Amino acid sequence: MIKHLLKIIWAQRKTNIWIFAELVVVICAVWWMTDQLYVDMRTYYSPMGYDISNSWRSQLDLFSPEAPEYVHEDTYISSGSEDLTRLQQQIKQHPAVEDVCISFYSAPYSGGNSWTGIKPVDGDTTIHEQSFQCRYVSPEYFDMFRITDIQGNSITRQLEGKHNPVIVSEDMALKFFHTEDVRGRQIRYPSEGGEHMTIAAVSVPYRDNSFVRSEPFFYKLITPQNIKDFFDGNSARYAEFCVRMKQPFSQDEMNNFLHEMGERLVVNNLHIYSASSIEYYREQRISGTVNKQDRKLSLMVFLLVNVLFGIIGTFWLRGQSRYSEVGLRVALGANRTNIKHFMYMEGLLLLFLTIPLTLAFSLHMIPLDMLDTYRIPYTIGRFLIVYCGTYLLMSVMICTGIWLPVRKAQQIAPAEALHYE
């Protein structure tokens, strides 16, 4: 049958060459759009590395000298960092609170951007000084946001009894040491005589938002012993003070909770005056990217709809022009079902004849850097998914365009078919 179909396609080459050219152009365009959509969807639904459900970020401030609650400096018996630690303990005692953590430019969707140079002590010697994001967090941070190591174990327990530990991401472990098993190995600041830090755990990758890939980074701990280093030079009100509730709270319920807490939200001049869910910060952080992605998706859908109607229309008209041919085959005793399959096979064969040209186009796009290989590497699996998906979509369009005219032609009376002929 294939040989017979090829003879028919060749005999009608004057018409088919234009359909063939249209298919090549359309498939290349659809393939590129499908690849972009695949990267966007795959990135969006990849694990974030943390869980922000039931989590709230509190806003801290200091009473001004004019406020009636203001505590004069002469009566101070503690530092800002000590006030922050005490405030954390007071809130954690409430039965509705699951966990409380302190961080500095490191809370999810905070836009924190603290970078520092770091290098391995006994790792890849070709790596020179590079800057990586450093997240300064208290030990509770990992339980608070459900951050685990790459085996799914608790990181907080692995920090117990460790002096000045550091936690690196899986990306950094692979970059520095080319392996994930790096516990006990060391990294250091690149300056002469820079501090050596022992790796206590390897965390799962962490993405700043749903539209970007993870990057190598590391955690430094904020502990009662070194908290002054962070919040005595910087006012304690700049700390990121996050709370996880045991049950989901609405904004009104959180406001009532803060009102109920009363004086427990105040330590000397440091106080919490409001709280917003981290889901709210997420929406604020990614709203611009979401709008951009929505416009991009709308454009893709619009183009695909145009392609759909174009391809359906082309094969519909092609089927209509061969109305008498189908009727004549029926009149001569051909099986109606076989005729339908024959027409489908002819359209699909014409489609698959485009594979060499579209394959050459696709493979040439990779070295030209026209595809997004930063968020997701270009692998054989990605190519097969997108390429096969494109041809599957085009096959459905072609079969839809063939179905109606063939269905009508099958119903033609033999006498009418002979009259046409």
Image: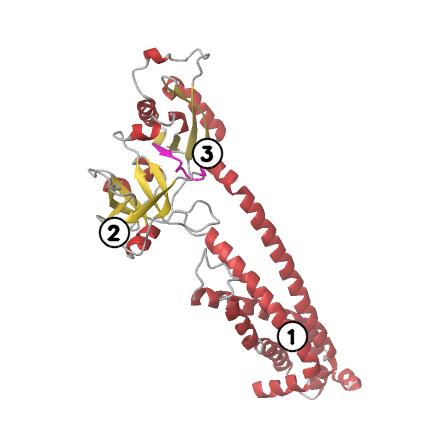
As helix, strand or loop, the secondary structure at mark 1 comes to helix
> For the view shown, which residue lies furthest in the left direction?
161
As helix, strand or loop, the secondary structure at mark 2 comes to loop
Report x, y in % for residue 408. 71, 74
Q: Is residue 325 left or right of residue 74?
A: right
Q: What crowding class fits label 3: few (fewer than 14 Cα within 10 Å), some (14-19), or many (20 or more)?
A: many
Q: In the image, what residue type sits under mark 1?
A: Ala
Report x, y in % for residue 132. 37, 46
The verdict on residue 109 being magenta is yes
Which residue is disc 2 drawn over? 182
Which residue is disc 1 drawn over? 21
Quarter residue 53 falls in: top left
Which residue range is magenta in the image? 99-111
The residue mark sitting in front, 1 or 2, is 2
As displayed, is residue 204 above or below residue 83?
A: below
Q: Nearer the viewer, residue 252 or 307?
A: 307
Q: Which mark is residue 277?
A: 3
As displayed, is residue 290 above or below residue 96?
A: below
Q: Are marks 3 and 2 in contact (CB under 8 Å)?
A: no
Report x, y in % for residue 16. 67, 79
> For the view shown, which residue lies furthest in the front direction?
192
The verdict on residue 132 being magenta is no
Sequence-earlier tag: 3 or 1: 1
Q: In the image, what residue type sits under mark 2?
A: Val
